Image (cartoon, rainbow, N blue to C red):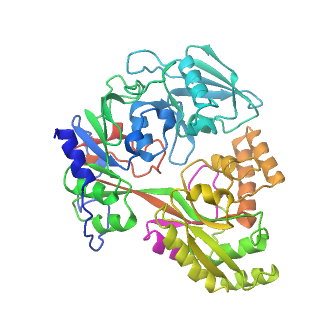
Amino acid sequence: MNQLHRRQFLISSGAALALTASGCGTRPQGSPTADSITPKQGGRLRAAFAGGGTNETLDPHLSNLFVDAARAKALFDKLADYGSDLAAIPRLAESWEPNTVLDTWTVKLRKATFHDGTTVTAEDVLYSYRRISDPKRAFRAKASLEPIDLAASKAIDTTTVQFRLKRPYADFPNLLAAFGAYIVPNGANDFTAPIGSGPFRFVSFTPGRSLLVRRNPDYWEGAAHLDELEFLVANEESARVSALLGGQVEYAHELNPATARAHEGRGKVNVVRLRNSAMQGFVMKTDRPPFDDKRVRQAFCLIADRKELVDGALSGAGEVGNDLFGRGCQYYASSLPQRVQDLERAKALLREAGAENLRVTLDTSPVAAGFVEAAGIFKEQAAKAGVTVEVKVGNKDTYWKDILDGGTFASYRSGSMPIESHISQRLLSTSTTNATHWKQPDFDELYTLAQSTRDIAARTALYERMQRRLHDEGGFLIWGFADWLVATAPAVRGVSKDAPANTLDWARFDKTWLT
């Protein structure tokens, strides 16, 4: 058994650990922070992620899982990526500028090269976006790029792309940062040994097991500190933790709160909490009884004891929500008062709606951490308001498809994305993933007006109007925002603590080093 396969065997067969009581803090007492140590060059970092099996691919446009995104980030670049506030930050794009009516955007590329030494050009960008948008392919970023008229878009010169849009789009830079919108060389379709422009170059890949990459010395943002980076697959959380504790990996992605609490502050590993990484809540179908009456929706939002839900379902690894998506993000309406439990007001609203002694089914599933626990907690909270909640645990393999149009009330979760993307993908009459079935023409008009508004202050005011409307009568009961938890060996430095999952500084292994 060669060294790589032996390591993978140890990771995959790692036994679950007996976890003890929790400590506190994110690093051993007295240890230095990443900022207090000069980065060290060299070494190989091994990172364990949950994987996708033997059908895995390095085609960045097929990115779906976290491991796909992390591997794609190592090998490729996007034109932009999201900052910690989910605003777009230039990457391969050096700048972007709209015309007066916001339906044409000119993007200038920075000087960058692919791993084979060829220059990244405007034709590479157009090829990549047209490939993603191919109606015969199922690429995740396709929906995000839909506003672009790619037939009318063109290369002005080798470093300038003119994007023509189907309608004014003030938040167009969000599309450049969309999940999976990576730039590949013109004509690329074979990704068995991919050539990208990212901070690492391809060495070897075994689907469902490992990817090995090596520092790209010519990276446009500066060479990585690490010599090599190895992604290893360990689908069970216990296996990832065992591998970390056993010295087989230096980075373990995605811990549950109980595991993190058991190991935090004990000196063997460092736990990194990526704040506001996952919205947690329930969706109410606004087009069918009983939630077609906004008073019932308002009552349910007042039934929720948010702190109890965060403490019980997330083991305290998060913060309370206010029935709005995107806490801490650009455009977030932080001025709205925090909603708190008010059972008497909830009962009064239910009486006004003729919904006393209401019985509802709450669909949930073990598809995400805390779902079943949150459903049980809310059931007990609802009983105090005279509402009977029947918890129905569904199939985790089909759960998201089942609740999109089925049922009336369901557990829900979302990773980080701009507030604009959340609205456009989930809350417009034409949105394809509108789980609350919120379809309000006047709300659609507000969104359209925002995208036609060049002044950012005026646009922010329009987003606040939309959020006030959603806070008052929308179908999302957003009770919390979960921390995303990763763990590293004590020798690992440079892991950002201010990067929600799927933002620029999440999984930035080119900025990580080993002491």
Task: Give the magenta range.
Answer: 307-333
Q: Which residue is drawn at 17% across and 38% down?
A: 2
Residue 31 position by quadrant: bottom left
Q: Kindly tell me whether residue 327 is visible in this rendering.
A: no
Question: Who is closer to the viewer here, 253 or 357?
Answer: 357
Residue 45 belongs to magenta span: no
Please state the horizontal and vertical placement of residue 214, each as a whole percent of the image.
Answer: 29, 30
User: Image check: 218 left or right of 365?
Assistant: left
Q: Is the magenta stretch mostly helix, strand or loop?
A: loop
Q: Residue at x 52, y 65 (%)?
A: 365
Question: From the image, which quarter does the N terminus lie in?
Answer: top left
Question: Who is closer to the viewer here, 260 or 85?
Answer: 260
Residue 284 position by quadrant: bottom right
Q: Kindly tell me whether residue 297 is visible in this rendering.
A: yes
Please state the horizontal and vertical placement of residue 101, each as a whole percent of the image.
Answer: 77, 31
Q: How many labels does the image show?
A: 0
Residue 332 belongs to magenta span: yes
Question: From the image, which quarter does the C terminus lie in?
Answer: top left
